[in-house]
Image: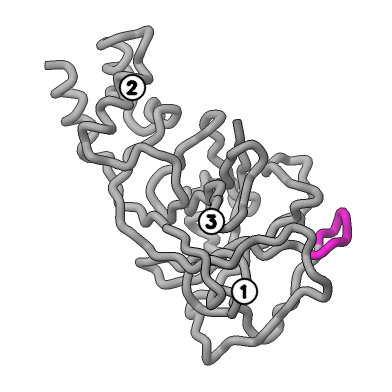
Amino acid sequence: MSETYLDELLKPLIKTAWQLKLSKSKSAQAATDSSKFGGLPYAESGDAWPSCPTCKNQLNFVAQLKHPTEKSLHTFFYCFDCFPWGSSKDETGQWLVRSYSAANMTNYAAIAPALPNQYQMAACNCTEHPVQVLPDYYDLGKVSPLADSLCEKIDDENSYDIYQAAVIRSGCLEDYATLIGGYPKWIQGESTKSCEICNSEMEFFAQLDSEDEADLMWGDCGAVYLFRCPQHKNEFALELQCY
């Protein structure tokens, strides 16, 4: 009976996210206005290839994400030399998200690194697949204190396993994946960010997993989490976690 009640409590929490599945392709080397990893990024007039303020090396273009419902495009650059984790000690500019509300190749203006980057990723096209997701166990107490306490009531010593079994019963995605929207799946525990402009809690935007297809590894099989302010849509925050 308790597990049935838990399932009912979790149903309203289910969200739709979009899982990105990568496929290595020479065509992905070229710029586009769609989601992809590696190659050349989408850019517009006035953009320049960004550099890290700390080590002075060029940032690596990692990926660009096209939000399936907003249709906005976001390009993500990162310094693999300085390897920022998203802490307050990171210098601004060690990573960068550029946002385009109406990206279109008619507005495209080419940019390219002045020198080949040391950390070469494989260029990959992406396909977006809608998936159902539930909050990570580490977020459950904040999202649904009642569901969190029920897991402990069912089995206090194995509440994590109780919740994971409920996720499986719901048919929601359980594995780590590269996602746009939904909920973050934490590796080292909850670490939601606040906007530096208005101090409001940021919304989860995307999770970039370590991707073998793109030759992309965040530390030891880690992931990057991107958050965006609901009021200031161009304000992003980063969190990197790994095992």
Q: Badge 1 local density, few (<14 within 10 Å), some, or many (20+)?
A: many
Determine whether, in the image, residue 27 is placed left or right of residue 48. Answer: left
* Circle 3 or circle 1, nearest the eye: 3
Residue type at numbered disc 1: Pro
Residue 224 percent location from the top left of the image? 58, 47
Q: Which mark is residue 41?
A: 1
Mark 3–mark 1 distance (CA, rounded to whole Å): 18 Å
Callout 2: helix, strand or loop? helix
Picture coordinates of residue 204, whole percent (x, y): 47, 48
Q: Is residue 181 left or right of residue 89?
A: left
- Choose mark 1 or mark 2, whichever is in front: 1
Who's the residue at 32% across and 29% down the image? Answer: 144
Q: SS of the residue at dot 3?
A: helix
Residue 138: horizontal and vertical position, in percent?
45, 28
Q: Which amino acid, mark 2?
A: Asp
Cα distance between the residues tagged 2 and 3: 36 Å
- Going from the N terminus, do you reach mark 3 or mark 1 first? 1
Residue 111 picture quarter: bottom right
Residue farthest to the left, as pictured: 1
Q: Position of residue 43 (x, y in %)?
A: 63, 79
Which residue is nearer to you in this view: 92 or 154? 154
**Residue at coordinates 75% horizontally, 52% vertically from top-left?**
80
* Residue depicted at x 54% and y 51%: 211
Stretch in magenta: 52-58
Q: State the residue position of label 2.
A: 148
Left or right: 156, with 90 as reference point? left
The picture quadrant where one finds residue 119 is bottom right
Query: Magenta segment: does it hold 15?
Result: no
